[in-house]
Every structure is written in C-alpha cells, then in structure tokens.
Amino acid sequence: MSIPFSRDIPIGDGYDLVVCGGGPSGIPAALSAKRAGLKVLLIEQTGQLGGVGTSAGVSHLLGGRTKDNKHWCVAGIFKEIVEDLAARGGALNPVDIEGEQFSPHGWTGKVSNLTYGVPFDPIQMVALLDEKMLEAGVDVLFFTAMVDVVVEDGQVTHVVIFNKGGLLAIPTRAVVDATGDGDVAARSGCDFVKGREEDGLMTPATLMFHVDRVDQDVLASEIYNTGSNRFKELIQDLRDKGEWTFDYDIFITVQLQEKGTLMVNTTRICDVDGTDGRSLSNGMMQGRGEVSRLFALMQKHFPGFKDARIKMVAPVLGIRETRRIVGDYVYKVADVGDVLNFEDNIGFSGYGWDLPDPKKPSYQPMHVDAGAPKLKRMYTPIPYRVLVPKPIKNVICPGRAISVERHVLGPLREMGPCYAMGQAAGLASLQVVRDGVAFKDVDTDRLRDDLKVVGAVVDWHE
C-alpha cells in the first residue's frame, strides 16, 4: 500500500558539489574539491565525521600500506590525516610499527594485512577532521540526511535533505554519493544490485566495542605460548559446555593507539540489511545483547580481560556490504587474480580478500574455496570507471558501493582505499563542474595528473 504525498520544499543555497556522507570516502572528496576551488557542502547523518571509523568504532584504518609495510598504497589526504593524527598522539603511524610474530594489531604476523593498519583514537580523529573542514572552508551539516533527489534530463539538480530545520532542497551541479550504501544512486534511478547473486544475502554486520584496562602482557603471553591468535580451541570448549552460544567461532581484537586499549571485532550479526531501518534497529539490539554476553565471557575465561572494562559500545553497526552500482564496467574477481593494470587507475588497496559468508560468519570463501584466485601482488589497483554509475551523469560513488563483483569488495571496501576513491571523486568533480562533462567522460589522464600533484599514489613503484 502507498499514499500520495507532496509538498512545497524551500530551496537552500546552491553548491558546486554536495557530498553525501562524512566517512572515509566523503571526507577526502569534500576536502579535495574545496581545496581545488569548488563550493562544497558535506552532509552527515550523525553528529561527527569519520564514518565507521569513529561512529561504528572500527578505529583501525586498513589497506593504506602494503602488508610487508614497505610502501604506502594510499597517500594524499589519507597519509596527511594519518601523519597529523599520529603527531598529536591520536594514532600509530604504520611506518613506525615493527613486525612481530604476533602483532597486537590483530595478533597476526610480520607480513599481514592487519599488522600495518592505522589504530587510532576516535575522539581525537573527530576533532582533527573538524579542524580540516573548518580550515578548508567546507560547509558541513551534521544530523542531516539525504532523503531524495530531483532529476532532470539525466542529472541531479537538487539534493533533498532533512534535519531539525525540516526539508530543504539544495541546488547542486554534482553529487558525490559517499553514503557507502549507494543511497543517492538508488534514489536517482541508477542501476544497482544488492548482496550475493543467488539470494541477495549480505555479509554479516558487526557491533564493535572498545575495552581498556586489559593486561595485554598476559594476553600476549598466552598467544605466544599456544600459537592460537583467535582462541578457536577455547571457544570450542566453551561451546561444548553450552557457554558460547554465538554463531561465530573466532575471537578478534586489535590494540588501538595505546597498549591495553583494544577494539573487539568479534560479533557477527547475520541477516542485517544495511538499507532497511527495521533491520538495522533489530541488528543494534541483537548486537548490544551479544556484546554484554561476550564481555562477561571475556572477563571470566579469556586471558588478560579479568579486570577490563568496556570503554565504548558503538552507536552504529559496522556494515560491510549493501548496494553496489552497476557501471559500464564491473570489476571482476578474475580481473583481480589476473593482475590487470588499468589506464584509468586512481588508487590502490593493500588489503586482501575479506568478505565472510552471510550465513557462516567465521567462514571466508575466498580464503579456502578451491579455484579462488590468490592475490599475486602486494596491492590491488582501482580503476576510475568503477566509481561511475549509470545513467545519471553527475553522480559518482566512491567507497563500497562501487561497480564490482561482490567478493572484490574484500580488498576495496576498507577505509584506506575508500580515501583514495574519495579523493579521486572530489578532483573528478572539477571537470564535471567547470567543463560541464559527465563523470563518465572525465579525462582520466588529467585526473591522474591532478592526483599526483596532491601526493596521491596512482602508479605503482616496483
């Protein structure tokens, strides 16, 4: 059933570019476009910037360094933020992290996708991002949602937003859809798919929480003595005793910027649709219940956690997968395995396959399935064309809503490569606004040159 609904909406000030979403792709999109001279509005539905890294508690930027820690895969604004935050003590710069047999940053080894991420303090990250936006002169609206768009002649002319002031239509010449869910693309009529092909199911969500007062020396000693960095044996024993009732069977923690403060990336909540409000609400309530039960087991059974306390439970679910646009080119798993190079390459990821099965939260199909291609290089290239939806001309979608086969999200959905895609989207907007071209017709040679000028990595140095 439906009801007709219409009303006159006031029109706000116009912008060259509206960026929808203040996460790891929206931040660099807004900053790069504004620094290049565009008038930019950034809207964010929470009260802070940083996206899943701050609001969802995923305070570990991954994919920005190669797993051997020899090269930046992502530089530009990403590297700027990492270095500035590390300089004030709010993050660990991965260049200063030394490899160990069991690094506390994921309890993995010297050559690992997790060891050389960027663990950070979300409070200090939020403060730094505010400063960056104020310094650049980006207009920011918090507690503001994109609810619809006005489309004329294949272009978005207005973005309809809602906040405490009510509905408002913002005139714009271009839009960066940095929602992560392809919300603008979907509202404007772009082609998209959602979930896996056979049933539409999506990889599990996670409700992150941070703990402090962990006796990390006791935890590390147990891991070094047993060689078990995911505590599968302990979990199986607890399951046999009826104490472990969760669907997942591995325990994942990551030390953040201070020893003894850990991010717990363990919960896996199945059947959550990140584009459905009721599903997200149910997922949050299930997640909070699981956090309480999991933490009690941690204090009782897991070494080093007896006197720990919960520092923060994220107010937002960590969503790994929802919509993906379908562009003229769809980046395939085979393309990654075949080590393709792209003339329109705008960035890289240093991360690997990581997309758990929708119904088996601890099972990684691309790690164990026969025939799954192995990543042959320390990096995965990102062609510009995967950011471009169709048929709308002036919308671009950096981040995990890109045009890929779903398992290609494994290396490309992480925050490091999202920063690379966002910076490219922001600079591509210059051509769309100033030259009047569609995003699909952006001169990518010129775009790559513009990215090089601002320090982005677009060509690999062997």
Image: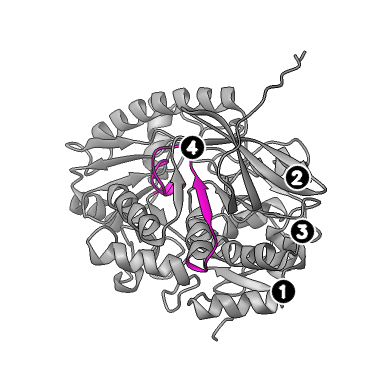
Q: Which mark is residue 45?
A: 4
Whether residues under marks 1 and 2 lie with C-beta atoms below 8 angstroms apart, the answer is no
In the image, which is nearer the foreground, mark 1 or mark 2? 1
* Residue kind at label 1, given as amino acid type: Asp
First in residue order: circle 3 vs circle 4: 4
Name the secondary structure under disc 3.
loop
- Magenta stretch: give its range: 35-58
Is 162 displayed left or right of 439 in the figure? left
Query: Which residue is disc 3 drawn over?
Result: 330
At 52% across and 37% down in the image, what residue appears?
205
* Residue kind at label 3, given as amino acid type: Val
Give the alpha-carbon distance from disc 4 to disc 1, as whole Å: 32 Å
Q: Which mark is residue 361?
A: none
Name the secondary structure under disc 4.
loop
Q: Position of residue 377 (x, y in %)?
A: 59, 75
Image quadrant assignment for residue 382: bottom right
First in residue order: circle 4 vs circle 1: 4
Query: Which residue is disc 1 drawn over?
Result: 443
